[in-house]
Every structure is written in C-alpha cells, then in structure tokens.
Amino acid sequence: MSDEAERALLAERIFAEQEERRRLGELLHDGPIQQLAALAQMLDAGLGALRAHEPARAEETLERALELARAATRDLRALCDDLEPRTLREVGFAATVRALARRTATRHGLEIDLDVEHASALGEHAQVALYQIVREAIDQAVRRGAPTRIEVSLEPTRGGGAVLVVSDDGPPERRSAVLEGLAERAASLNARFSSEVRYPRGSTIRIELPPSAAQR
C-alpha cells in the first residue's frame, strides 16, 4: 500500500471514529442521561414522601422509579449491543438487522419489512458500516415522527456492488444534519448517497456501494 493510500485510510478511520463519538454522545444525552435525571427526581420525591410519613405516595413513586431504572438498563444494554453487536460477527448482517428491527418494532409499535439476505456476500467492513447506516436511519426515522412502516432492502449490483435502500412513511421533514451524517458514513465507504422525500408522508435514502467497497 502506498503512503498516500495509507494516509487516506487513516483519515477515513479517524473521521469514522469522530462520527461515532458524536452519535454516541447524542444517544447518551437524549436517552440514558435524561432517564437518570428523571430517576433522581423520582427518588428525591420518594424520599420526601417517606420523611413526610406518607408511605402510600412513597411506594407509588418508588415503583415508577423502578420501572424507569429498568427501562434505562434495557436502553443501555441495547446501546452497547448496537455499538459492537456480537451477532454481526457471530451470525451475520441479516440476523443482526432482524434483531434490531424486532426491538424497534416492539418498542415503537410499527412494522419493519426487511430484504437483506444478500448481505452475506459482502465483506466484513462493508457489513459493519452498512449496519451502522441502517441503525442510524431507523433511529432517525423514529425520532423524526411516528412512522407506521419502515422498509430496508439490500440488493446486489453488477460487478459485485450493492444498493441499500431505507424508506419510511413518517413525516418527510429531515434535519439537514441527519442527512449529512448519513452521507458522511456513505462517503467513508466511497459510496453514492441520495435521498428523496414524498409529501404528505414518506422519505427514502439510497446508498450505492461500489464493488471495491462491498468486498472489503
């Protein structure tokens, strides 16, 4: 490998790490940190009820605090799994995306349709990067509004490339930062990124992976 290629690869890895840290910080702030802050308030209220000799109110408050603590534990466990999903290396891309889809569909009461069996032909680096894109696209679709259906497909192209498409029927508004983040992830794979909105509802992102990147 030439010095120029090594520098380009190093820059790509640094950029990907920076983006992952940014995404992780946002997820922690919007999820577990908010939950822990609410938990502290509930515990403080429960302690106040005990000191005021109001056992019924204290018990009710502590029960709600316990439910929130369990929810925060589940969210942190899911976040850890998403950061480095063991199943991605153990059982592959398709099974890992199915597990993500089940968690999301159950939690948010929506339908997620998958067609990703072609991923088994992709290289390990491509599978990890595409999983991160799918995860972020689904997460942002849920955060953006209330979709009832999300579709994820991964199809082969001539010469050994692949096309990933993620669409949903939620409100079409997308923050530019969301699309920029997804486009940057695609760029780290030397892939083409495009997006489309449909009014009054629906949006689609498309990632076209070249053969050179698909086999990495």
Image (spheres, grey):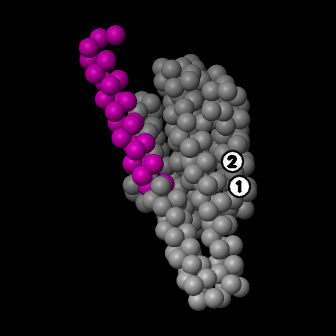
Q: Out of 9 and 196, give the one closest to the viewer.
A: 9
Q: Out of 36 and 101, give the one closest to the viewer.
A: 36
Which of the 4 quarters of the picture holds residue 60? bottom right
Mark 2 residue crowding within 10 angstroms, few (<14) / some (14–19) / many (20+): many
Describe residue 104's horizontal placement relative to residue 28 as left or right: right
Which quadrant is home to the N terminus? top left
Give the residue pinned by disc 2. 101
Q: Are the residues tagged 2 and 1 within 8 Å (C-beta)?
A: yes
* Secondary structure state at the residue bearing disc 2: helix
Give the residue pinned by disc 1. 105
Give the residue drawn at x 57%, y 85%.
51
- On whether residue 25 falls in the magenta region, the answer is yes
**Image coordinates for residue 80, horizontal then vertical, percent:** 56, 44
- On whether residue 174 falls in the magenta region, the answer is no
Give the residue drawn at x 57%, y 57%.
141
Which stretch did the figure color magenta? 1-27
Residue 172 in sight in this render? no
Which of the 4 quarters of the picture holds residue 123? top right
Q: Is 151 above or below relative to 60?
A: above
Give the residue drawn at x 69%, y 59%.
107
Describe residue 84's horizontal placement relative to residue 155 as left or right: left
Distance in Å between CA atoms under marks 2 and 1: 6 Å
* Secondary structure state at the residue bearing disc 1: helix
Mark 1 residue crowding within 10 angstroms, few (<14) / some (14–19) / many (20+): some
